Amino acid sequence: MQIDYIVCPDSIADKLESKHRVTVREARQVLLNDPRIRFAEKGHRAGQDVYGAFGQTLGGRYLAVFFIYESDTATAVMISARDMSGKERKTYGRK
């Protein structure tokens, strides 16, 4: 999957910082740093499915970033980001 553009609406950016203590910059770093991407669920519109990207920030933080992938424009629209759970981190370390 190729991501050419990353979009984060202001309302989502506020939620990431207040609820999950993740900055948009950290989430972008994960998406741009060769993450492991996994299909999460089928989107409400054709060509807009939800995916999870699992990776590290440049500072070494392990994050899970969830986004809608718009295949026609290769755009990732962030919908959430959080620290990886222990199980996710264990799985991430094995691959």
Image (spheres, rainbow, N blue to C red):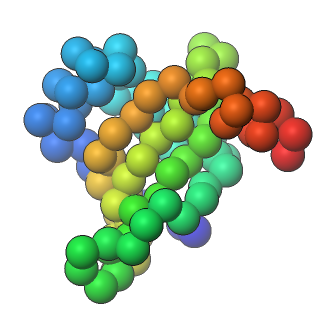
Image coordinates for residue 50, horizontal then vertical, percent: 40, 62
Q: Quadrant of residue 44?
A: bottom left
Q: In the image as oriented, which residue stretches furthest toward the bottom?
A: 46
Farthest front residue? 87
Residue at 13% from the left image edge and 35% from the top image edge: 10
Taking 84 as reference, is 79 above or below it?
A: below
Is residue 27 visible in the rendered image? The answer is yes
Residue 72 occupies quadrant: bottom left
Question: Where residue 1 appears, x then y in whole percent?
Answer: 57, 68
Placement of 6 over or under 73, stated as above or below = above
Task: Determine whether 51 is above or below 57 in the image.
Answer: below
- Give residue 35's position: percent from left, percent from top: 64, 46
Q: Nearer the viewer, residue 86 or 80?
A: 86
Q: Residue furthest right?
A: 94
Q: Is residue 32 visible?
A: no
Residue at horizontal 67 percent and vertical 36 percent from the top: 88
Residue 53 location, x and y as percent?
Answer: 55, 48
Residue at (39%, 74%) from the top-left corner? Answer: 42
Nearest to the observer: residue 51 or residue 60: 51
Is residue 28 toward the left or the right of residue 61 in the image? left
Residue at 17 percent of width and 43 percent of height: 9
Question: Residue 61, relative to residue 25: is it above or below?
Answer: above
